[in-house]
Amino acid sequence: MKVLRYFACFVVYVLLASCSRDSREPVDYVNPYIGNISHLLVPTFPTVQLPNSLLRVYPERADYTSEYLNGLPVIVTNHRERSAFKLSVTTAETEAAVIPLSYDNERITPYSYSVTLADGEIDARFAVSHQSAMYEFTSDKPLRLVLASLEGTVGSDGEGIFGTQTVLGDTKVYVYLQTKQRPQLTVAADSTRAVLSFDEGHVQLRYGISFISCGQARANLQRELKDYDIDALAKEGRRIWNETLSRFKVKGGTDDERTVFYTACYRTFERPVCLSEDGRYWSAWDSSVHEDGGTPFYTDDWLWDTYRAAHPLRVLTDSKMEEDILTSFLRMAAEGGDMWMPTFPDISGDGRRMNSNHAIASFADALAKGLDVDIPKACEASYKALKEKTLAPWSGAPAGELDRFFWEHGYVAALRPGEPETDPVVHSFEKRQPVAVTLGTAYDCWCMSKIARAAGDDELATYFEDFSRCYTGLFNPATLFFHPKDKDGNFIENLDYDAPGGLGAREYYDENNAWVYRWDVQHDIPGLIALMGGNERFCSELDRMFATPLGKGKYQFYAQLPDHTGNVGQFSMANEPSLHVPYLYNYAGAAWKTQKRVRQMLNTWFRNDLMGVPGDEDGGGLSSFVVFSVLGFYPVTPGSTEYAIGSPVFPEATLRLSNGKEFRIIAKGASAQNKYILSASLDGKRLERPFISHEDIMAGGVLDLRMGANPSPDAF
C-alpha cells in the first residue's frame, strides 16, 4: 500500500512539474544574467528593453560582482556604454550628483527591473516602453531623487524636469521627466542636476527619451505613457516579448537548454535600435534631423560581428525590418557625404571599428534571398567603401598607399619585424592586420560581385569575382596556413602560428591567431579544400586545430590574445571569425564531425550560468550562432542561399517566417547523447547532402532527422 501511495505521489509530482513547465511562456525562460561575469574582457549586460527599441537600460555597474550601483539607469546610448543620465534615490539630504547605492534582491526580466536599495531601505521598480519608461520607489521614509547630467544641463518647465547630455561629437540625448507626487524642486547653480524632495516614501516617476529635442522627449512620453500604472506597462512589455520570442517554438529538451536558447533569442533583439521618433530621426552622419518617410531608421549595429548570423536570422524571421535596416545603411552613406557603406554604425556615427566592409555581405545576402533593397545605391555604396575608403583597420580615411598596393597586388603587405610603418592612415594600435584584411576583403569582393551582377553591371561583377580569389596568394603550401607577405611578395619566416604578431596578433591577423584565420574563406570553401589537398587533409587539419594545445600557460597566451577565449585546442569559440568553422566538415564529406563539434561548442561554452558566454557578445554576434545552432542549421556564407545542417538540440522546433509560414525541424530522439544524424529528409524526400536552401525554408518545409548516439558517416 505504501508503495502505491508513494508511486501516486510521484506521478502527481511529475504531472505538476510538467504542467508548471508547460505553462511557462518563452520570456519566462530568458535569463539576462547569463554571461554577466566575463571570461576575460567584456561581460554581457542584463538589458531591459523592448525588441530593437531606442530606450534600453541595465544596472549601473561594471559586472555582476559589483558591490554598488552607480545610481540608477536612464538610457544606455550605445551597446556597452553606461547611462547617459544618472538617477539616484536616497532618504538622506544630499548635494551629490550621483549616489553609490548598495543593492540586494535584484530581479531582471527583458521588460522590467526591481531591486532593494540602501541596505533594505528603498524598494525600486522599473518597466520600459519603446521611448519612455517608469520607476516606482517605496520607503518608510521621505524620498529624495537626483537627476544628473554629467555632460549637459537640467532644468524645469514647471510641469516636469528636462535635461540634455552630449553623447559624442554633435550627438545629444534628451530626457523629460515627471512625477505623480509633487516634489520640492532644487536645480543646482551649474544646472547639472536637479534634486526632487518628497514628503512621502512612495514616488511614481515616468520619463521620455529623445535624440531630437527635449520637446520630442516630452512628446514621446505623452504618446506612450498615459498614466503611472507600472504594472500595466510591465504587462504590455511582457506581451511584446512573448510575441517576439514566439517566432521560435521548441518542444522537449531540458530547462537549461530552453533557457540558453531563449536567452540567446532575446539578445539578438537588442540591436540595432530604431531611432525614428514620430516619423523623424537624428543622424550623426550629417548632424541633422531627417524625415524618415515611413521607413524607420536603425543604428547601433556592429557589422563585423552581426553580418555572420544576426542579419541572416532576421532575413528569415523579419525581412521587413531587415530591409529597413539596410535602407538605414544607405541613408548613412548618403548623409555622410561620401556614399561609403558603414562598418560600425552607432548612435554617434560610424565608429569604423575592426576591419573589412561587411555591410556589403548583408546586402548580398538580402539580394540572394529576395529582399527589396535599392540595388543601384547598394552597388554604389559598396563599391566606394571598397575603393575610396581605406582598408586600414579602424580608419575612416580615404584610400592611401596600403590600398593602392592591395588593388595592384591582391594582398595587404605586411611589415617585417622592426620595419617602421609608413602609411599615416594605419592605426598605431590596430596595425595593418594584413592577413585578416586580405581575407575579409576577398570575401567582400565576392559579395560585391553579387551586388554588381544584380545591378546589371556584368563587367564590374566579373572584376570583383576574379579579385575574390586573391586570398590564394597568402596561402603557404608548405605549412597550409595563410601567411603574411612583405611588399616584395616573400613570406615572413619563423612565424609562431599560435601567437603571431604582437598584442591581439594585429601585426598580421586580428584578435585571433593563425589557426582561426586558416578557415576565413567563407565564399570559396571548395577552393580552400583544394588548397589544403582535398577532403581528407582538410578534415584532418580541422581536427588538428581542435586537438592542438595552447602551447603555453593561459596567463601568457591570454596576455597576448585576450579575445581568443572559449578554447577547444587552438579554436576560439569566443570570437566571431570562428563561428562558421565547426560547420566546415560538412563541405568535406564528414558531416558527423560537424554534428559533434557543434554540440561540443554549445555544451562547453554556452551555459545557463553567470559565465555562460565565452567572449564578447557584441549585441547578438555570438547569440545568433547559438540560435541557429540549437535549431540545427547555420548560414556559413551570407550571400549564398545555402545553410549547413548541424545537430538540433530539441526533438522539435518551429521557426515562424517572415512570409507567415513555418519551418519545422523534427529531430526524433535528440538528446545530449543523441547528437548524431542517422537519416535526413526534407518534406519526405531523402537529403543527399547536409545542406538546405533558403527556398526550402521559406516554403515552410519540414526537416525530418533521426538522431542517435553514434556517428553515421553515411547519413548523407
Image (cartoon, grey):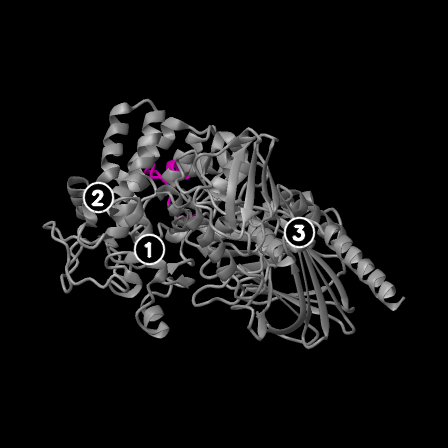
Give the residue displayed 30% in from the left and 69% down from the top: 551
Name the residue nearer the viewer: 170 or 578: 578
Secondary structure state at the residue bearing disc 2? helix
Q: Amino acid at mark 1?
A: Val
Secondary structure state at the residue bearing disc 3? helix
Mark 2 or 3: the one toward you = 2
Quadrant of the drawing holding the N terminus: bottom right
Give the label on residue 516, or none: 1
Check the image and name the residue furthest to the right. 1
Q: Amino acid at mark 3?
A: Val
**Position of residue 628 measured from the top left corner of the image (x, y, whole percent):** 51, 46
Mark 3 or 1: the one toward you = 1
Q: Between marks 3 and 1, how big is the CA–CA gap?
A: 35 Å
Relative vertical location of residue 376 with respect to residue 57 in this rendering, above or below: above
Q: Main secondary structure of the magenta part?
A: loop
| Residue labelled with disc 3 | 27
What span is in magenta?
Answer: 332-345
Give the label on residue 472, or none: 2
**Position of residue 90 measured from the top left corner of the image (x, y, whole percent):** 67, 72
**Position of residue 123 measured from the top left corner of the image (x, y, whole percent):** 72, 68
Number of marks: 3
10 Å neighbourhood of mark 3: few (<14), some, or many (≥20)?
A: many
Check the image and name the residue furthest to the left. 488
Q: Is residue 306 magenta?
A: no
**Toward which corner of the image does residue 45 lie, by quadrant?**
bottom right
Left or right of 337 on screen, residue 9: right
